Image (cartoon, helix red, strand yellow):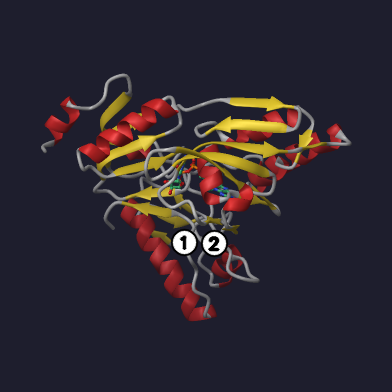
């Protein structure tokens, strides 16, 4: 079916953007256009658009705030679904519940402001609740899964299911057993902090460290590579003298070697070339194979 036909048949009641520049929806601020971008505001609408994609035999992709993806210049066919409008956050005692599109930092702020500890070191990590669960985002020794109690998903058959933390295997920046599932929301069981002033200070200190150490004045998608066993990707990249290395408009951040920054209107292919170059040079010099943390969408 032609794109115009597909557009005519799209389910009503959902916000769409056609030929949507993914540069506007990702933190790298580069990337080609998505043919059809859907922005459902609740799970019922999400289910509708996914059922439509299946019926029309169109590929469908899900993302949150685009802070860990790089979209190729050729863009994305089919339906790309952004969950950033699926918002919601509630705290009852020490149980914190959030919808997929709620920004992670809002969740952390709400926890800290309610005097609950267990997530404060996640302060300032960009992205959504769903993205944080999917990636098991973490920082400073704390991970999304630490205090996670359960999360709701839409499974491959578009059925809603609640999964408890113990039902899925998780590790550093990786969650298994959820292939094909879309995270709709999550519940964290936190702890009452004995010293609320100290808890607030831990959040402020974490936010401050991120400003001090990360190149937040340029678009990026955070650390490009996963931490190799017993090492740090940024330390290895720095050791190889790669800070400031460029490919087109992309640059290895001079401030934090683990980040590639969109320094000057980088094409996604510039960023990919720089990723490849870093992997090659680090392997040649140190024997360590760096594994990308970031997710590449489209044809590179
Ligand atoms: C400046 C900067 C600093 C960063 N620092 C850190 C850090 O300290 N620690 C860290 O872990 N990460 C860090 N990141 C990376 C990023 O913030 C995290 O990976 C974040 O959890 C991604 O969330 P998102 O909503 O943006 O996901 P997206 O980039 O939108 O998507 C990432 C992946 O998750 C999947 N996904 C997203 N939402 C859902 C859902 N609801 N259901 C199923 N799958 C879904 C997507 O399909 C995609 O595969 C940083 C990024 C930036 C830009």
Q: Secondary structure at mark 2?
A: loop
Q: Residue at x 11, y 38 (%)?
A: 1
Q: Secondary structure at mark 1?
A: loop
Q: Residues within 10 Å of mark 1 (few under 14, many from 20)?
A: some
Q: Is residue 209 above or below residue 299?
A: above
Q: How many marks?
A: 2
The answer to whether 9 appears left or right of 164 in the picture is left
The reply to whether residue 34 is in sight is no
Q: Earlier in the sequence, mark 2 or mark 1?
A: 2
Kindly tell me whether mark 1's CB lies below 8 Å from ligand 1. Answer: no
Q: 288 or 182: nearer the eye? A: 182
For residue 44, which quarter of the picture?
A: top left
Residue 32, horizontal then vertical, whole percent? 28, 43
Q: 218 or 196: nearer the eye? A: 196
- Residue lying at the far top of the rendered structure: 13
- Distance, label 2 to label 1, CA atoms, is 6 Å
Instruction: Please say if the residues under marks 2 and 1 sit with CB atoms less than 8 Å apart.
Output: yes
The answer to whether 167 appears left or right of 64 in the picture is right
Q: Residues within 10 Å of mark 2 (few under 14, many from 20)?
A: some
Q: Residue at x 52, y 80 (%)?
A: 287
Q: Residue at x 29, y 28 (%)?
A: 17
**In the rendered image, which residue does mark 2 sit on?**
226
**In the rendered image, which residue does mark 1 sit on?**
292
The reply to whether residue 11 is in sight is yes
**Which disc number belongs to residue 269?**
none
In the rendered image, which quarter contains the C terminus? bottom left
The answer to whether 226 appears left or right of 122 in the picture is left
Residue 112, horizontal then vertical, whole percent? 74, 32
Residue 200, horizontal then vertical, whole percent? 79, 34
Residue 132, horizontal then vertical, whole percent? 55, 44
């Amino acid at each position: 079916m032609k794109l115009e036909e597909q557009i005519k048949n799209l389910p009503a009641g959902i916000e769409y953007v056609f030929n949507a520049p993914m540069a506007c929806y990702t933190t790298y601020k580069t990337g080609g256009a998505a043919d059809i971008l859907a922005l459902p505001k609740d799970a019922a609408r999400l289910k509708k658009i996914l059922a439509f994609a299946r019926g029309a035999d169109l590929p469908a992709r899900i993302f949150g705030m685009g802070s860990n993806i790089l979209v190729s210049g050729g863009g994305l066919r089919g339906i790309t679904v952004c969950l950033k409008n699926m918002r919601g956050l509630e705290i009852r005692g020490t149980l914190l519940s959030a919808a997929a599109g709620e920004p992670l930092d809002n969740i952390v702020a709400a926890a800290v402001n309610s005097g609950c500890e267990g997530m404060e070191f996640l302060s300032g990590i960009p992205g959504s609740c769903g993205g944080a669960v999917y990636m098991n985002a973490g920082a400073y020794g704390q991970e999304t899964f630490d205090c996670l109690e359960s999360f709701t998903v839409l499974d491959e058959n578009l059925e809603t299911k609640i999964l408890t933390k113990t039902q899925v295997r998780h590790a550093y920046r990786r969650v298994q057993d959820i292939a094909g599932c879309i995270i709709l929301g999550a519940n964290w069981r936190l702890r009452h902090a004995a010293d609320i002033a100290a808890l607030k200070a831990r959040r402020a200190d974490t936010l401050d460290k991120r400003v001090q150490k990360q190149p937040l004045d340029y678009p990026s998608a955070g650390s490009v590579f996963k931490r190799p066993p017993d090492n740090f990707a940024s330390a290895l990249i720095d050791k190889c003298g790669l800070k400031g290395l460029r490919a087109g408009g992309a640059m290895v951040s001079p401030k934090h070697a683990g980040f590639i920054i969109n320094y000057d209107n980088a094409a996604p292919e510039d960023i990919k070339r720089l990723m490849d170059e870093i992997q090659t040079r680090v392997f040649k010099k140190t024997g360590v194979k760096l594994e990308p943390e970031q997710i590449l969408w489209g044809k590179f």
